């Protein structure tokens, strides 16, 4: 499948399909998981939102590369369950990492990963050969507004 998947920027017309992908991929729902919020993210220009498209034109993966002016952050890496284990997630991570470095000047990238999802932590463990490593010093605190 890897050879037949293309990665491209997400368009506003893709947003409903991306939100559905997140649901299908069992991403933990967030207050920002809406078509409107995703469109706002795309329009804002600080984030790089990419999708992976299969030969049939279906969105089978997504990733958001955020830039806060200090470092890059990877969010919402998701691959459709039927398309997993074909290199799509690695393709998305490599592309968004490259774009964060080139377009935003990122020198460090952080990936937020749901530790309760073994498929997610297993993927990131497999990315150690690409330089990603678990940082045991950090935990995350959030406040929903």
Image (tube, grey):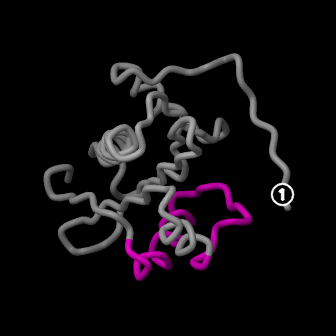
Q: Where is residue 76 in the image (x, y as percent from the top left)?
A: 53, 53
Q: Where is residue 21 in the image (x, y as percent from the top left)?
A: 48, 66
Numbered range of the magenta stretch: 11-36
- Which residue in the structure is indicated by mark 1? 144
The residue at 43%/59% (across/down) is 49
The quadrant the C terminus occupies is: bottom right
Residue 97 in view, yes or no: yes
Tag 1: Cα neighbours inside 10 Å, few (<14), some, or many (≥20)?
few
Q: Tell me the SS state at disc 1.
A: loop
Horizontal relation, residue 74 to residue 85: left or right: right
Horizontal relation, residue 128 to residue 115: left or right: left
The residue at 61%/20% (across/down) is 135
| Residue 27 vs residue 62, the one in the foreground | 62
The residue at 81%/45% (across/down) is 142
Magenta includes 68? no
**Number of numbered tags placed on the structure image:** 1
The residue at 48%/28% (across/down) is 108
For residue 36, which quarter of the picture? bottom right
| Residue 68 vs residue 23, the one in the foreground | 68
Residue 80 in view, yes or no: no
Q: Is residue 137 above or below residue 54?
A: above
Horizontal relation, residue 53 to residue 135: left or right: left
């Amino acid at each position: 499948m890897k050879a037949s998947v293309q990665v491209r920027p997400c368009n506003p017309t893709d947003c409903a399909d991306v939100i559905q992908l997140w649901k299908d991929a069992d991403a933990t729902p967030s207050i920002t998981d809406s078509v409107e919020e995703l469109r706002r993210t795309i329009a804002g220009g600080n984030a790089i939102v990419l999708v992976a498209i299969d030969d049939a034109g279906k969105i089978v993966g997504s990733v958001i590369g955020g830039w806060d002016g200090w470092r890059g952050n990877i969010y919402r890496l998701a691959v459709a369950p039927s398309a997993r284990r074909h290199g799509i997630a690695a393709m998305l991570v490599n592309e968004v990492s490259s774009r964060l470095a080139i377009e935003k000047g990122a020198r460090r990238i952080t990936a937020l990963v749901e530790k309760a999802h073994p498929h997610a932590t297993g993927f990131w463990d497999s990315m150690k050969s690409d330089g990603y490593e678990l940082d045991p010093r950090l935990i995350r605190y959030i406040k929903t507004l």
